[in-house]
Image: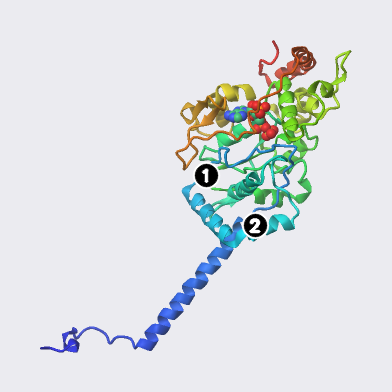
Amino acid sequence: MPSASMALPASLPEPLPRSIFRKFVLMLCSLLVSLYVFYCLAEQCQNLPGPIIQSPEEEEGGYQESDMTIWQSVKRKKLLQKMKRQRSTKGKEAPWNRLFVSHGVDISFHAHTGEENKASHRTSMLDSTLTPLGEGSKNLPQAIIVGVKKGGTRALLEFLRIHPDIRAVGAEPHFFDRNYDKGLDWYRDLMPRTLDGQITMEKTPSYFVTKEAPARISAMSKEAKLIVVVRDPVTRVISDYTQTLSKRPDIPSFESLIFKNRTTGLIDISWSAIQIGIYAKHMENWLLDFPIDQMLFVSGERLIRDPAGELGRVQDFLGLKRIITDKHFYFNKTKGFPCLKKAEGSSKPHCLGKTKGRTHPNIDPKVVQRLREFYRPFNMKFYQMTGQDFGWDY
Ligand SMILES: Nc1ncnc2c1ncn2[C@@H]1O[C@H](COP(=O)(O)OS(=O)(=O)O)[C@@H](OP(=O)(O)O)[C@H]1O
């Protein structure tokens, strides 16, 4: 019988001595471990979001997990799951939690939102800034949904997010009203990463009524495209009141808030909810800094009746291919609103959360009529300015 060593072909090199081989494997392992640790640390730092102040007065509950949260890629989703796993193993004291606390920032969206929802908002904030290392760059927004409060701004943003060429920050940054002193770098850092040709967007409805907002946006970019979702000012003010009522059930009645003098029917224009609906007045301010063709006015009513039609106009305005069409929507009878058939990367239908589409209280028709009269001249002026009849006056 030939021995084992004799069976080896003569051309094979001498095997490495065991001790050298072991050292080599050990070094390789430690190199791989350090690379992995380095990667994890870098990834976490990259994805920590900057603080955002979200007033419960504004879009309370706007951006929930139950809302239409669109993932731009499966890769992002995987990363998020990984971050969630890391967070759950580290408990409540995860680094991003500590960061929010240490900044003293409350990013909850609703005064009445439960703790569970608050946690999901926090996750949503992370979602909106989550981007794998090296994928694209953060840019200042080229298009902003500037208003109006309760107009349908969340629906528009969430629908737009289906478009592969749009990347939007989920929460409202409130940069041009409340956070301007934080500077443009702070603002840019909130934005999601974009690839060449993709448009960065955000929405903050209170910009529309902020005196300084037009000049500040223009100072950032004279070419910025502005989108205003407008809604019948009468329904808008009732919606605004309904939102406040849901948080503070003890507020005075709608009637007592809108009238300065109930007997004479004098409307109290010092109430901010009334002021917001005087669109023509706010427009004068915007037109000092932006030409009208840089502004698009979306009908909040048509956004509900025919979302694809309004989305078509918005995509044209943004210079994008009409990718969002009828086939993306279905009407959810229970919700009473159009919803998305599926978010990207998901096969499930998605509706906005329960704070969107609340049942409004019944208001005395005479009071509604008085409000219609009040707004009519301002609406006429607004139709003239925009060249669009929104059909609120009949
Ligand atoms: N698809 C869909 N689903 C649900 N809700 C929809 C939708 N499209 C428009 N709307 C209307 O959006 C209203 C809320 O407007 P905003 O998102 O601008 O509110 S906020 O200012 O950000 O708080 C909200 O107002 P209310 O009905 O008064 O709750 C809705 O009427």
Q: What residue is at 54 percent from the left and 68 percent from the top?
A: 37
Image side of residue 11 versus residue 31, left or right: left
Looking at this view, name the residue that lies furthest to the top.
394
Residue 29, compared with residue 231, is above or below; it is below
Q: Earlier in the sequence, mark 2 or mark 1?
A: 1
Instruction: Tell me the element at label 1.
Output: loop
Q: Would you name the residue on which mark 1 appears?
A: 71
Q: Marks 1 and 2: in contact by CB < 8 Å?
A: no
Q: Which quadrant: the N terminus?
A: bottom left
Residue 146 sits in quarter: top right
Percent x, y of residue 375: 77, 17
Percent x, y of residue 312: 54, 27
Q: Does the residue labelled 1 lie within 8 Å of ligand 1?
A: no
**Which residue occupies the foreground of this view, 269 or 353?**
353
Residue 25, compared with residue 90, is above or below; it is below
**Which residue occupies the foreground of this view, 245 or 205?**
245
Q: Would you name the residue on which mark 2 appears?
A: 96
